[in-house]
């Protein structure tokens, strides 16, 4: 999900079962993603319909995608991913030529940062928004997400 004017891309690993079933990014009700973005952007995204949430992100220059385009997995946890076909940065850069920064949501996604940095993008790792990342408090995650997404016009 990008537009030509997308400047920041948030990359997850691959959609979990709830997201695949709903055909929406971060659909699991306990995932902190939409709560984090609501706080970072100071806008109640969690209360909006999904299509409007996506439009609001895009209007702020923020896109969403995954580091994997396909994978074999038993369940929704990143640790269950057995084999994956990575998405190529060049694919997204053709659609978002103004892309400046790639932010990686969680450890699995962060393992793919080097490929994205080769294209000249600024890369940043984020604490996972997943409910499986219960060891990190919301306020810690929020501080990191705010710092990573701070870009003129985004927040």
Image (cartoon, grey):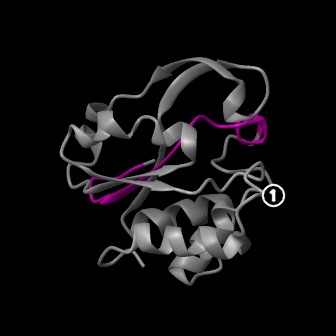
In this view of the protein, which residue sits in the foreground, 46 or 149? Answer: 149
Please give the name of the residue rendered at 65% of the width and 79% of the height, measured from the top-left corner.
Answer: 44
In this view of the protein, which residue sits in the foreground, 27 or 22? Answer: 27
Question: Label 1, on which residue?
Answer: 30
Q: Is residue 104 left or right of residue 21?
A: left
Query: Does residue 7 belong to the magenta stretch?
Result: yes
| 58 is higher (above) or lower (below) than 68 | below
Q: Position of residue 127 (x, y in %)?
A: 58, 57
Q: Which residues are magenta?
A: 2-21
Residue 92 visible in the snapshot: no
Q: Position of residue 66 (x, y in %)?
A: 50, 38
Q: Position of residue 154 (x, y in %)?
A: 38, 74
| 61 is higher (above) or lower (below) than 155 | above
Q: Residues within 10 Å of mark 1 (few under 14, many from 20)?
A: few
Please give the name of the residue rendered at 42% of the width and 35% of the height, measured from the top-left corner.
Answer: 112
In this view of the protein, which residue sits in the foreground, 154 or 128? Answer: 128
Query: Does residue 20 belong to the magenta stretch?
Result: yes
């Amino acid at each position: 999900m990008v537009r030509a004017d997308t400047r920041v891309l948030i990359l997850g690993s691959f959609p979990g079962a709830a997201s695949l079933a709903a055909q929406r990014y971060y659909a699991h009700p306990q995932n902190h993603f939409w709560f984090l973005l609501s706080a970072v952007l100071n806008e109640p995204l969690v209360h909006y319909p999904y299509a409007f949430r996506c439009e609001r992100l895009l209007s702020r220059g923020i896109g969403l995608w995954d580091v994997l385009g396909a994978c074999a997995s038993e369940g929704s946890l990143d640790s269950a991913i057995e084999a994956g076909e990575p998405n190529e940065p060049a694919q997204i850069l053709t659609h978002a030529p103004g892309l400046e920064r790639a932010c990686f949501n969680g450890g699995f996604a962060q393992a793919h940062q080097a490929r994205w940095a080769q294209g000249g993008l600024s890369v940043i790792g984020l604490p996972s928004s997943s409910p499986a990342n219960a060891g990190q408090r919301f306020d810690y995650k929020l501080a990191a997400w705010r710092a990573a997404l701070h870009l003129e016009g985004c927040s």
